Amino acid sequence: MRFGSDSGQPPTGDDPNAASTPAQVLQFPVIRPVEGAREPLLIDFPAAQAPDSPTEEPGLAIAEVSRQLGVASPTLRTWDRRYGLSPSVRTAGAHRRYTATDIARIQLMRTLTLEGLAPADAARIALLTPEKELDIEPILPTPGRQSAPDERQNLDKARSEPSADKGGAQNERPVLRVLPGLPPDSPAFRIEAAVDAALEFNLSGCIDALSFARDEADPTRWWVEIARPALTALAERVVLSLPGESPITIAETATHRALDDYLHRYDAERANLGLPTMRHPARLNKLVLILGDPGHPETPAAHALAAGLIIGGAAARVVTGSLSPRRLGELLNLTKPAALILTYGAARTPGFIEEIRSHLPDIPVFIDLPKGSEPLSFDNATAIHQISSFEALKSQTLAIL
């Protein structure tokens, strides 16, 4: 659910004395509590200059703003297109640039959405906040960008002098500081970008944030350092969503897409080198089946683990669907796996371990033991390994194949 204002009318712009003042018209989606329908709210904001006129005011390109704020470029474009948080100046070459005020509004928007406010309402607050109430930081020069001498002096002065009120005392009001610049490929940047995009219900932006880099070759490390922290951060949020909108679903879908794209690229590269692909029959003698919780078998963690095993030379498959002990026995007879990996919930399912032992008495069984959980006890614990580290689960499984 998104909350929107239903009181008052937007400015009409009928004042004849204001006819010569250029204005920027912005649209926001609003939910009317009574009607329950999305309608546009038009608000006129007087602009300091015509948007098409070149300016000498310093500004940053979208990539630079993305690095400074930790907000993915696709998210910034969505906020521009959907909510009107746009670059307000143009260079002589007609390139759009974000001013310090634009950046302060984006930072306010980001802070409000991370606190759980609906994006449309956060954008409205960010745009309607008077400039004097924004926490505006001077635009810092980026590598390869030379600032003019007078601009450099102003930046040095801004860095060295504390802000003060009229009485001369240091201003104690909390401010929204621009985040330090992070490399776009750093885990922290990608986690925040994925969370931002998921909260915006922006699937393509979330996929961009979670997708594997060209030199990224370890799905296990990717899961531990990027995908899992992003999903954990989303799970801790309290979000009001419309029907059909789910940040967790967006992030889980992006996780599956990132793994799928990576494995397709891995397969294509091996095929080009004349090496067996992940579906080659020769790999089936190292088949590992991964069984998820009966209530939620298709977890992203199981797929990330399977991808890590495949990169390590195994053939790994995630077992999904309704799985009873009898069906598990039929599956084992059909596939003859070399090892089994069970989630904690699957290992506790009555009859599972007994069924496994009745069909494959000596098969190695690995149990993903949650941190802090007591190991499970079994009548026949031979070849049962209970491991609480995701990385160790992969490495020890590969070691016995």
Image (cartoon, helix red, strand yellow):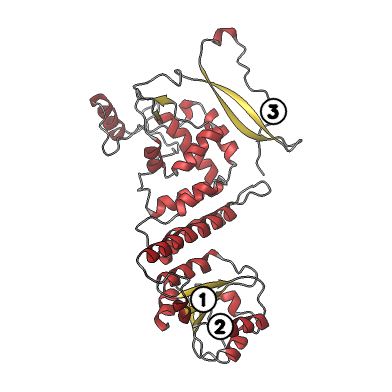
* Tag 1 and tag 2, C-beta contact below 8 Å: yes
Q: CA distance from mark 2 to mark 3?
A: 59 Å
**How far from the left and from the top, in percent, is residue 27?**
59, 29
Q: Quadrant of the N terminus?
A: top right
Amino acid under disc 2? Leu
Is residue 85 in sight in this rendering?
yes
Viewer-proximal residue among 390 and 110? 390
* First reached walking from the N terminus: tag 2 or tag 3: 3
Residue 369, label in figure: 1
Q: CA distance from mark 3 to mark 1?
A: 54 Å
On screen, residue 22 above or below 137: above
**How far from the left and from the top, in percent, is residue 233?**
51, 55
Amino acid under disc 1? Leu
Query: Would you say 227 lies left or right of 11 here?
Result: left
* Mark 2 secondary-structure assignment: loop
* First reached walking from the N terminus: tag 3 or tag 1: 3
Q: Quadrant of residue 160?
A: top left
> What residue sits 50% from the left and 82% below the top?
339
* Mark 1 secondary-structure assignment: loop
Crowding near the residue tagged with mark 3, few <14, some 14–19, many ≥20 C-alpha atoms within 10 Å: few
Query: Would you say 201 lies left or right of 47 here?
Result: right
> What residue sits 60% from the left and 32% below the top?
28
On screen, residue 209 above or below 112: below
* Mark 3 secondary-structure assignment: loop
Crowding near the residue tagged with mark 1, few <14, some 14–19, many ≥20 C-alpha atoms within 10 Å: many
Q: Quadrant of residue 163?
A: top left
Amino acid under disc 3? Ser
Residue tagged 2: 376
Viewer-proximal residue among 157 and 191? 191
Viewer-proximal residue among 293 and 337? 337
Is residue 196 in sight in this rendering?
no
Residue tagged 3: 7
